[in-house]
Image (spheres, rainbow, N blue to C red):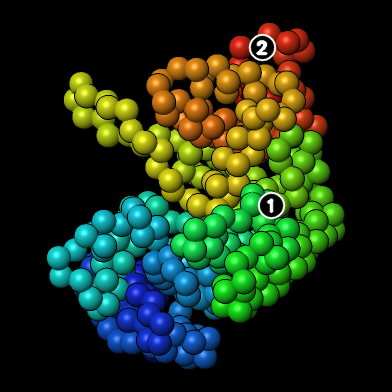
């Protein structure tokens, strides 16, 4: 099997098998079939082909398969599923038609795919440490909520405490519930130990593999976890022509639906990595909270929180998180240390006047 560089392949990745559709430069379908979604299967099929453009949709298997296809000499485009309405909004949707649609879009105009770029193997493995920690924290929270609810159902309450020390609350559990809840307390203690282990791993990553996080951690509220999550998610700061693009990339910018003379206010898009967005909003709450040190960013956020009704504080935290994402990118590419008042004084109208460009 041999095809020239004018051939475009659409590859709809499945868990066991993937559908393949090849079209030529005139748009004619020249071959359709399926391959196993394994390294051996993709090597066997695409290893015999001449260099061509291969279009696939982002998903669980797209990171490793895109790297493999590039290794085989093909041009690989990973389509952003959120942008390709022709596929996810099609009334007649199946793997064969999806593969053909990907091939045709890749042949006509690759910009329609809003192609994404997957991170490298090492960065992806480091990011999984952070994601594993997030799963552990979420699981521990569910167990703690269940225990508190079970105790409430018996007419009692457990005293407030941190999640790390919750395991000691078993002494406060009613006698007739202790046997039932003992396994959950054991799991909570184990999860806490594993979370601390992940924290040590993240600190080690920040120190050894990602020294560029040091300027980012000079910002109050940004610790090793947020800094490493930020760097491993973005991976390459040069992929953004302007620091302000980072806010939109992480889904912290408002969407747009302008038509004619109408341009209604929209919610943030929530595109990009949801956990990093959560971490940045958490840092923003610290900056605006009672323990946040005085800074232009804090003053700006607090002034926003006084306007706009009962949800003003939430919206202000999101706005500060967006500014924070931009500021962190600027510090990353410039290797500068955070300055609370970049203008040099205490009355700075914008927290990013001298830092974001």
Q: Residue at x 33, y 33 (%)?
A: 266
Q: Residue at x 67, y 48 (%)?
A: 226
The span from disc 1 to disc 2 (Cα, nearest Å) is 37 Å
Residue 181 is at least partly visible in this image:
no
x, y (%) of residue 11?
37, 75
x, y (%) of residue 92?
15, 70
Helix, strand or loop status at disc 2: loop
Where is mark 2, residue-wise?
Answer: 348
Where is mark 1, residue-wise?
Answer: 162
User: How busy is the neighbourhood of tag 2: few (under 14 within 10 Å), some, or many (20 plus)?
Assistant: some
Residue 88 left/right relative to 49: left
Q: Nearer the viewer, mark 1 or mark 2?
A: 1
Question: Residue 18 shows which numbered tag?
Answer: none
Among numbered discs 1 and 2, the one appearing first in the sequence: 1
Helix, strand or loop status at disc 1: loop
Residue 252 left/right relative to 20: right
Nearer-the-camera pick, 304 or 122: 304
Q: Is residue 286 above or below residue 207?
A: above
x, y (%) of residue 85?
26, 56
x, y (%) of residue 325?
60, 38
Nearer-the-camera pick, 18 or 176: 176
Toward which corner of the image does residue 191 lie, by quadrant? bottom right
Nearer-the-camera pick, 294 or 190: 190
Q: Is residue 333 above or below residue 162?
A: above
User: How busy is the neighbourhood of tag 1: few (under 14 within 10 Å), some, or many (20 plus)?
Assistant: few
Toward which corner of the image does residue 36 lie, by quadrant? bottom left
Q: Quadrant of the N terminus?
A: bottom left
């Amino acid at each position: 099997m041999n095809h020239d560089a004018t051939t475009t392949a659409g590859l709809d990745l499945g868990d066991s098998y993937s559908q393949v559709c090849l079209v030529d430069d005139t748009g004619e379908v020249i071959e359709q079939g399926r391959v196993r979604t394994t390294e051996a299967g993709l090597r066997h099929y695409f290893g015999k082909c001449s260099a061509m453009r291969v279009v696939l949709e982002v998903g669980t298997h797209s990171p490793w398969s895109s790297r493999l296809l590039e290794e085989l000499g093909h041009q690989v485009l990973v389509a952003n599923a959120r942008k390709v309405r022709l596929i996810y909004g099609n009334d007649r949707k199946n793997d064969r038609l999806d593969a053909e649609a990907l091939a045709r879009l890749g042949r006509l105009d690759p910009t329609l795919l809003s192609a994404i770029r997957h991170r490298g193997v090492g960065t992806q493995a480091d990011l999984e440490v952070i994601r594993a920690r997030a799963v552990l924290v979420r699981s521990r929270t569910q167990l703690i909520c269940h225990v508190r609810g079970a105790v409430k159902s018996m007419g009692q309450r457990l005293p407030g405490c941190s999640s790390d020390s919750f395991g000691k609350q078993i002494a406060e559990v009613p006698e007739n519930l202790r046997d039932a809840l003992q396994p959950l307390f054991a799991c909570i203690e184990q999860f806490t130990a594993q979370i601390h282990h992940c924290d040590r791993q993240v600190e080690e990553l920040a120190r050894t593999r990602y020294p560029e996080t040091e300027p980012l951690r000079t910002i109050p509220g940004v610790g090793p976890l947020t800094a490493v999550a930020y760097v491993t998610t973005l991976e390459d700061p040069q992929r953004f022509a302007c620091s302000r693009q980072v806010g939109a990339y992480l889904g912290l910018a408002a969407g747009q639906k302008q038509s004619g003379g109408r341009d209604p206010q929209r919610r943030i898009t929530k595109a990009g990595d949801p956990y990093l967005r959560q971490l940045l909003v958490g840092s923003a709450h610290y900056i605006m909270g009672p323990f946040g040190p005085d800074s232009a960013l804090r003053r700006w956020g607090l002034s926003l929180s006084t306007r706009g009704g009962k949800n003003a504080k939430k919206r202000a935290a999101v706005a500060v998180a967006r500014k924070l994402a931009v500021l962190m990118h600027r510090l990353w590419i410039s290797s500068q240390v955070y300055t609370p008042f970049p203008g040099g004084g205490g009355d700075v109208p914008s927290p990013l006047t001298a830092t974001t460009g």
